[in-house]
Image: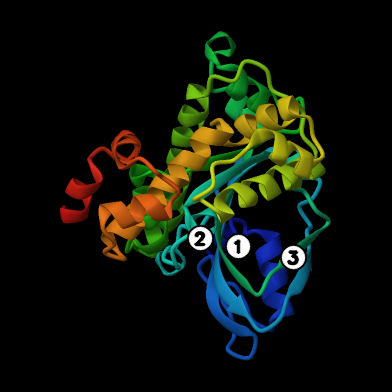
């Protein structure tokens, strides 16, 4: 039994354990107190899919050689972030950092010979063989986004927000009490369920043509995202954002929608309404104060936009 279990533990997790002077037990690595606190879980379910769960704080950054570099070159990475309870609540106006989301990337954009182990990490990484996933779906029935991702013919990167039913699965992975006998089986089922539901969301995206991305493009688009969300009271101007990004307005809009699945303005408006909901419910601001704080001069328009995104009028929401 011990031999079989060892074969299901990722080599990179064992290397981290060795670096910290400890060992992996039942797929779990506890961070020794002298290095920090927290834990890591690692599962190799089979040759097609594996999962790493990181939730720790270290006193200083470390670097671990990635022994699986060549073995994982043809995989798709699903990286869940801001999904642990203690990382979800931060001050108002910081939704760009705390909204639960998942990054979906072809391995060509994320593979490194050395894996950085940062001082504060709370993520779940699922790696799946692209060929295995591609074989599960009829080619003719795939959307362009799904088809391009699974065929793994160009560097692609998407971000998908995590909705409540997805968060529920994540919560089960993180905290559901499961006997060790069933742990590996349970985790594999949950990992596959997450991947399936995320592919279902990508299938809904209406992008007809996908463009190969590079790390510089991705970094630029994320800087634009940060600009947009830094001042939610100011509607974004495409020409100003494009100038700042060093891109044409057409390329900026195209790549932004490809990564986030939404236009720049719709994305901005979505986070603007999240902030409005936070101010109304948590900060107890009035509807008028909230609307004006977020740049609305017409409170009737604010009420309409809020209902479109949240599902009820601001006043009703604040009293719910």
Q: CA distance from mark 1 to mark 3?
A: 23 Å
For disc 1, the marked residue is 6
The tag on residue 94 is 2
Q: Where is residue 223 drawn, in percent x and y?
A: 70, 50
Task: Look at discs 2 and 3 and give the one toward the viewer.
Answer: 2
Task: Look at discs 2 and 1 and give the one toward the viewer.
Answer: 2
Residue farthest to the front, as pictured = 297
Q: CA distance from mark 2 to mark 1?
A: 41 Å
Q: CA distance from mark 2 to mark 3?
A: 25 Å
Query: Residue shown at 48%/43% (left/top)?
Result: 161
**Is residue 251 left or right of 286 when viewed as pictured?**
right
Crowd class of label 2 (few under 14; some 14 to 19; many from 20; radius 10 Å): some
- Disc with the residue nearer the chain's start (2 vs 3): 2
Q: Secondary structure at mark 2?
A: loop
- Disc with the residue nearer the chain's start (1 vs 3): 1
- Disc with the residue nearer the chain's start (2 vs 1): 1
Q: Secondary structure at mark 3?
A: strand
The tag on residue 169 is none
For disc 3, the marked residue is 116
Q: Where is residue 186 drawn, in percent x and y?
A: 40, 51
- Label count reads 3
**Would residue 44 be visible to someone looking at this image?**
no
């Amino acid at each position: 039994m011990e031999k079989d279990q060892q074969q299901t533990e990722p080599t990179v997790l064992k290397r981290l354990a060795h670096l910290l002077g400890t060992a992996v037990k039942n797929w779990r690595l506890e961070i020794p107190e002298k290095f920090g606190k927290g834990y890591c879980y690692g599962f190799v379910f089979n040759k097609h899919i594996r999962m790493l769960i990181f939730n720790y704080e270290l006193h200083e950054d470390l670097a671990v050689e990635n022994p699986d570099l060549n073995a994982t070159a043809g995989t798709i990475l699903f990286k869940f972030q801001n999904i642990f309870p203690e990382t979800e609540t931060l001050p108002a106006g910081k939704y760009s950092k705390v909204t639960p989301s998942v990054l979906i990337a072809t391995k060509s954009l994320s593979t490194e010979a050395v894996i950085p182990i940062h001082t504060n990490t709370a993520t779940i990484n699922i790696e799946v063989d692209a060929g295995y996933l591609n074989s599960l779906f009829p080619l003719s029935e795939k959307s362009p986004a799904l088809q391009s991702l699974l065929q793994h013919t160009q560097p692609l990167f998407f971000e998908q927000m995590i909705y409540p039913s997805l968060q529920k699965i994540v919560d089960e992975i993180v905290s559901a009490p499961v006997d060790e006998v069933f742990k590996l089986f349970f985790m594999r089922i949950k990992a596959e369920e997450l991947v399936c539901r995320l592919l279902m969301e990508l299938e809904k995206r209406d992008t007809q043509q996908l463009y190969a991305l590079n790390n510089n493009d991705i970094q630029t688009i994320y800087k634009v995202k940060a600009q947009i969300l830094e001042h939610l009271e100011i509607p974004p101007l495409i020409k100003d954002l494009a100038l700042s990004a060093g891109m044409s307005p057409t390329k900026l809009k195209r790549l932004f929608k490809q990564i986030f699945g939404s236009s720049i303005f719709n994305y901005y408006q979505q986070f603007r309404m999240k902030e409005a909901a936070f101010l109304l419910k948590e900060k107890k601001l009035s509807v008028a104060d909230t609307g004006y704080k977020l740049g609305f001069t017409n409170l009737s328009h604010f009420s309409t936009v809020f209902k479109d995104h949240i599902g009820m009028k601001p006043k009703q929401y604040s009293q719910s």
